[in-house]
Image (cartoon, grey):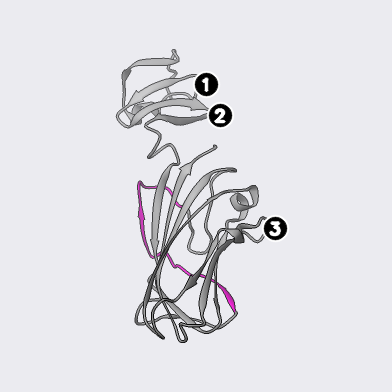
Amino acid sequence: MVKNTSYKVHAGTTTDAERLTYNIEDGAYVTTESGVWTVYNNAWVKVYPQAGEGTGIGWTRYDDTQYTSLNKLSLVDGVEINLPNNAVNAYRSYAGIDYYNGTRILADNLNDVYILTIAFKCSAANANQTFLRVQLDAENGTPYERVGVDIAFPRGNDEMHEFHQVFQYYADQNFVDNGSLLKATSMGGTAKVWDIIYFIQKTQSYA
């Protein structure tokens, strides 16, 4: 049963379950156990605190289980690949949010702002002359490849190197519509990558 609130502002505190039975009314203002809510653009929007469920602000972590120390991903010199992450192990700040679908990095709305942290282990057969290029690529003409880094191998040949990098970016409309890929290229020699982790945080939402 859907109730008509009959008034726009609730002076007292109700529950989230009760709030969801109310008609969507522009100007409604309700306090529940999870925070303060109002109606904007025909949907409930959380006003305070500005994080957690209902805001779209949160984080997800995706751990790849395919490429491990027992099964390293081999990169051929000069050949660009999509850096894989099967996202078998996923952790979220709260249920129902995803910024990656196992293939592509996702964005919810135009002009949303995100922080992407990439972590993995890597090695190079010839550490002195090899570097690894990692970058975003939305494949639509927007120069997301500028959101990237060249990784040197400071340790010896075939020695494990821990890599951790943070990228910040906004979403254009093509990013929202089609997602983005994370590209990797070994330059100057072959390399291996394993234990890949994506940690993605949405910091601003323009819904």
In the rendered image, which quarter is residue 185 located in?
A: bottom right
Residues 94 and 25: in front is 94
Q: Is residue 40 found left or right of 90 in the rendered image? A: right
- Against 128, residue 3 (above or below) is above
Image vertical order of residue 19 relative to residue 201, above or below: above
Classed neighbour count for the residue bearing mark 3: other residues with Cα under 10 Å, few (<14), some (14–19), many (≥20): few
What residue is disc 2 on?
A: 41
Is most of the magenta stretch helix, strand or loop?
A: loop
* Nearer to the camera, 3 or 80: 80
What residue type is disc 1 on? Asp
Give residue 141's mark.
3
Q: Between marks 1 and 2, how big is the CA–CA gap?
A: 8 Å
Q: Give the range drawn in magenta.
A: 79-98
Distance, label 2 to label 3, CA atoms, is 31 Å
| Mark 2 neighbour density, 10 Å: few (under 14) some (14–19) many (20 or more) | few
Query: In the rendered structure, does residue 91 fall within the stretch colored magenta?
Result: yes
Q: What residue type is labelled 2?
A: Asn
Is 117 inside the magenta-drawn segment? no
